[in-house]
Image (cartoon, coloured by chain):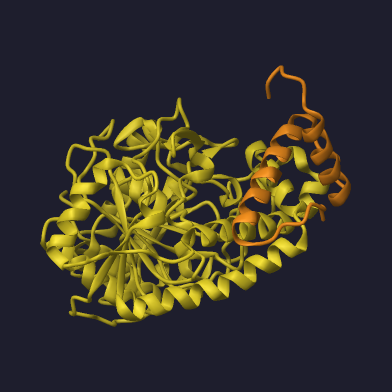
Chain colours: A orange, B yellow
């Protein structure tokens, strides 16, 4: 975690992950989950055809 | 007491009554007590049960009963193999206080039935998700060749224990490279066998579509010996098959230290450099498949006990569990296509050779390495070259390049399913030519 404010995009991804899974994300996980989700989308795009929707 | 060098010679000495198993096991226990603090490879030292088991082996020998081909040989397992009487933790706080196992994992049972003595269980990345062995509960396993560096992961504790001479062999698991990466960084032989060839009963799962288990050893002879015990197979091959070196994806970000070794290998074997089509896609599909299956496996705990997860692992699992089902379906479909392509390539070149890791062991105080001019996370990216291969389910033997005095680097030798004997034959050829082999580290406390 850094002292930088969390971007709206990061908040949006984290909220959607939380909603899809029914999990309350720990605050310290918000950036990590969003970063990992973006990385997975990047990998998906390499071999497949990603959709923008979660879950 | 002088302990013989090879596992076969150790067992022979015990079987003949010239070396008590109790003495050999005690030496392993003592080595763990003195050397482990510097590397943090072992999480549970099983001294009492190991002494009992060694005494049982000695009693059999005294009665004229053969204890088996691993008589009295000490070994260790990664913290995700069931050990009767202990919880199977998978290196996670989540499972630290679960009920003790009622039976050993099937492969542990097989090794014990052959006379081997379990002396320790070893550190890992929590839930096997990572390539460095940095564990929130047990700490970081340090590389015996340089304790300021990682041992690799996720089976890093098992690898470091063997490399440092604590045990002659150890078991790990390999889903995406968790045997081959630490074998490369710790200068060992590590076998990821054909998918499905060894039973996973009693092994904590991670990604069932990719999970395998296998041994780490310091020599090829030891590897073949342990493999024969694990499988009951005595298949041998004396052929020197046509090999090819994988370039393309497997040259991306490659440390220049590999170059002279690969040139020597090409000169020795006549191996051309070829490209494995779609390796990058395979790596990405394996990455996605792992995150999705792993995330779903742990979803119930993520919902109810997320604070007990290792934070770095939890975030990856949460992201994977939330990925749309379509991503997983596409990964599975691509897996079949990629596997067919790789098998066709193996018909033309029965052995494929690729680096096991792009770089030697990264520093613990800078847990990254450079890839395409950018710093990338060692925990996430050290499996760059291993993930495409395991995605196809083929057997891979990681072998240590002979580089005395330098940080270890490993190669992957790849064959068609069921062709482990061919891998051993090719490795013998490289070993005889002085290209590969184990060079002992200088270990604190040794």
- Judge from the rendering whether residue B9 lies leftward or rightward of residue B160; answer left or right: left
Q: Position of residue B20 (x, y in %)?
A: 24, 59
Q: Residue at x 50, y 66 (%)?
A: B212
All told, the count of numbered labels is: 0
Asked if one can make out residue B7 in the rendered structure from this viewpoint, the answer is no
Q: Residue at x 23, y 51 (%)?
A: B401
Closer to the camera, A16 or B32?
A16
- Judge from the rendering whether residue B389 lies leftward or rightward of residue B259; answer left or right: right
Q: Residue at x 82, y 48 (%)?
A: B303
Task: Determine whether B105 is above or below B92 in the image.
Answer: below
Q: Position of residue B128 (x, y in %)?
A: 56, 51
Q: Residue at x 65, y 56 (%)?
A: A44
Closer to the camera, B33 or B213?
B213
Q: Position of residue B88 (x, y in %)?
A: 60, 54
Task: Determine whether A46 is above or below B439 in the image.
Answer: below
- Judge from the rendering whether residue B202 lies leftward or rightward of residue B319; answer left or right: left
Q: Position of residue B224 (x, y in %)?
A: 28, 69
Most extreme residue toward the top, as rendered?
A3
Asked if one can make out residue B32 in the rendered structure from this viewpoint, the answer is yes
State the quadrant of the C terminus of chain B: top left
Closer to the camera, A26 or B74?
A26
């Amino acid at each position: 975690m850094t002292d930088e404010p969390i971007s709206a995009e990061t908040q949006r991804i984290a909220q959607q992950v939380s909603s899809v899974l029914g999990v309350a994300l720990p605050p310290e996980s918000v950036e990590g989950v969003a970063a990992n989700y973006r990385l997975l989308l990047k990998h998906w795009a390499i071999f497949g055809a990603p959709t923008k929707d979660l879950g | 007491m002088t302990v013989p060098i090879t596992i076969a010679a150790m067992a022979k000495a015990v079987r003949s009554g010239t070396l008590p198993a109790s003495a050999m096991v005690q030496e392993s226990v003592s080595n763990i007590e003195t050397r482990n603090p510097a590397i943090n490879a072992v999480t549970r030292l099983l001294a009492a049960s190991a002494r009992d088991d060694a005494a049982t082996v000695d009693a059999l020998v005294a009665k004229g009963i053969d204890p088996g081909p691993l008589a009295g040989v000490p070994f260790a397992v990664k913290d995700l193999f069931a050990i009767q009487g202990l919880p199977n933790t998978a290196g996670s706080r989540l499972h630290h206080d679960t009920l003790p196992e009622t039976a050993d994992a099937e492969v542990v049972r097989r090794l014990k039935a052959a006379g081997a003595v379990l002396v320790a269980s070893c550190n890992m990345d929590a839930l096997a998700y990572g390539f460095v062995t940095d564990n929130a509960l047990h700490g970081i396993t340090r590389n015996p060749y340089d304790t300021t560096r990682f041992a690799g992961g996720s089976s890093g504790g098992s690898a470091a224990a063997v490399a440092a001479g604590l045990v002659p062999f150890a078991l790990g698991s390999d889903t995406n490279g968790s045997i081959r990466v630490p074998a490369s960084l710790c200068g060992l032989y590590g076998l990821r066998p054909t998918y499905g060839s060894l039973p996973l009963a009693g092994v904590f799962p991670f990604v069932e579509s990719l999970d395998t288990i296998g041994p780490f050893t310091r020599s090829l002879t030891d590897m073949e010996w342990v493999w024969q015990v694990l499988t009951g197979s005595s298949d041998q091959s004396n052929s020197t098959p046509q090999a090819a070196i994988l370039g393309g994806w497997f040259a991306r970000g490659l440390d220049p230290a590999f170059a002279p070794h690969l040139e020597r290998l090409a000169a020795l074997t006549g191996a051309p450099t070829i490209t494995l089509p779609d390796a990058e896609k395979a790596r990405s599909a394996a990455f996605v498949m792992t995150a999705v299956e792993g995330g779903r496996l742990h979803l119930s705990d993520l919902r109810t006990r997320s604070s007990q997860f290792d934070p770095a692992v939890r975030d990856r699992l949460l992201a994977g569990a939330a990925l749309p089902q379509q991503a997983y379906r596409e990964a599975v479909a691509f897996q079949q296509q990629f596997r067919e392509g790789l098998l066709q390539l193996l018909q033309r070149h029965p052995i494929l050779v690729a680096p096991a890791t792009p770089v030697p062991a990264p520093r613990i105080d800078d847990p990254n390495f450079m890839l395409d001019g950018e710093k990338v996370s060692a925990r996430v990216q050290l499996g760059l070259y291993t993930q495409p291969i395991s995605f196809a389910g083929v057997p891979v033997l990681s072998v240590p390049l002979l580089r005395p005095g330098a940080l270890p680097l490993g190669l992957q030798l790849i064959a068609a399913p069921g062709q482990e004997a061919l891998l051993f034959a090719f490795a013998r050829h490289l070993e005889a030519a002085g290209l590969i082999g184990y060079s002992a580290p200088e270990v604190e406390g040794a």
